[in-house]
Image (cartoon, rainbow, N blue to C red):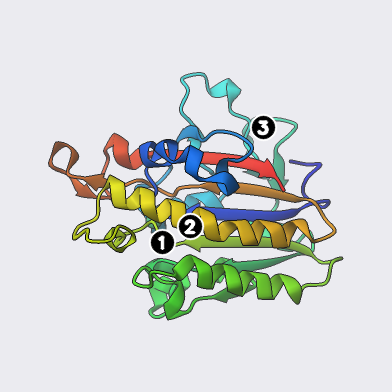
Amino acid sequence: MNEIVGSHDLLMITLDTLRYDAAVMEEMNCPNLCGGGHWELRHTPGSFTYAAHHAFFGGFLPTPATTDKSEHVRLFHSKNTGLKTHPYTWQFDSTDLVSGLQAEDYRTVCIGGVIFFTKKVPLAKVLPGYFQESYWRMAFGVTNPRSTEHQVNHAIKLLQNTDQAQRLFLFMNVSAIHGPNHYFVPGAKVDSVETQRAALRYADGELGRLFQAFRERERPVFCMVFSDHGTAYGEDGYHGHRLAHEVVWNVPYREFIL
Ligand SMILES: [Zn+2]
């Protein structure tokens, strides 16, 4: 990561609420997200959006689902904690990696999706507040069946107005996979693994344009894509998230260079 920070643009995408099993079942149908490899099984540090994103911005991305912690090389870590860190880990001397990257001359931009990014009430300003610039529109939210299209269009516009020499850290919270997602399957009345899979296929189709726009920039791009938590559709009687169940804590994770 020490070779990437400074030389690459950074793109972090959270596919809000995407279950690991749904992601794996759609790998073949997601050429943009999975064209270069498979989803990795990880455990989220938080069972809902607010908790998980605080952890992510603090440098705690989803943890590899392995019993051998020595295999886990953290991408980001706070400096001077006294804890042993790997030489490949990039350390930030700040409260969080967003302001840490800002200190390295990155322009930090947030494109919001679900309710915790709407900036409509003080609580919903906290996560966008990590960034120098943050954007949310009604059309980016969970009720719009074309939300990812609108989010990607906005991001591409920002990219076109960003100088090639400017280092960029773009964060996007994709809302389409979060409920309600039943409208991605014609005739479906309730959300399910099936309708979430359809929402993921839709989001993948739109993200291709974002990746292409990043590829056209001078700098190579380090891309991190993962879910913040899964969700339960009736497993063991559970519904939703903000609860501890394997369908919530198991999340898909990928990192790749664009
Ligand atoms: Zn979430």
Which circle's residue, 1 or 3, is located before the other in the chain? 3
Classed neighbour count for the residue bearing mark 1: other residues with Cα under 10 Å, few (<14), some (14–19), many (≥20)? many
Q: Quadrant of residue 184?
A: bottom left
Is the CB–ligand 1 distance for label 3 below 8 Å?
Answer: no
Q: Which amino acid does label 3 sit on?
A: Thr
Which circle's residue, 2 or 3, is located before the other in the chain? 3
Q: Which residue is drawn at 67% across and 32% down?
A: 85
Q: Give SS at disc 1.
A: loop
Which circle's residue, 2 or 1, is located before the other in the chain? 1
Q: Give SS at disc 3.
A: loop
Q: Which amino acid does label 2 sit on?
A: Ala
Nearer the camera: disc 2 or disc 3? 2
Alpha carbon of mark 2 to alpha carbon of mark 1: how far? 7 Å
Q: Residue at x 34, y 51 (%)?
A: 196
The percent coordinates of residue 227 (x first, y second) are 45, 48
> For ligand 1, which image quadrant applies?
bottom left
Q: Circle 1 is placed at which residue position?
A: 176
Q: Which residue is drawn at 62% across and 33% down?
A: 83
Alpha carbon of mark 2 to alpha carbon of mark 3: how far? 35 Å
Position of residue 73 relative to residue 107, above or below, is: above
Left or right relative to 19: residue 107: right
Alpha carbon of mark 1 to alpha carbon of mark 3: how far? 36 Å
Q: Circle 3 is placed at which residue position?
A: 85
The percent coordinates of residue 252 (x first, y second) are 46, 39
Labelled disc at residue 203: 2
Q: Camera-side residue: 83 or 225?
A: 225
Residue most extreme to the left: 237
Q: Which residue is drawn at 17% across and 44% down?
A: 234
Q: Which amino acid does label 1 sit on?
A: Ala
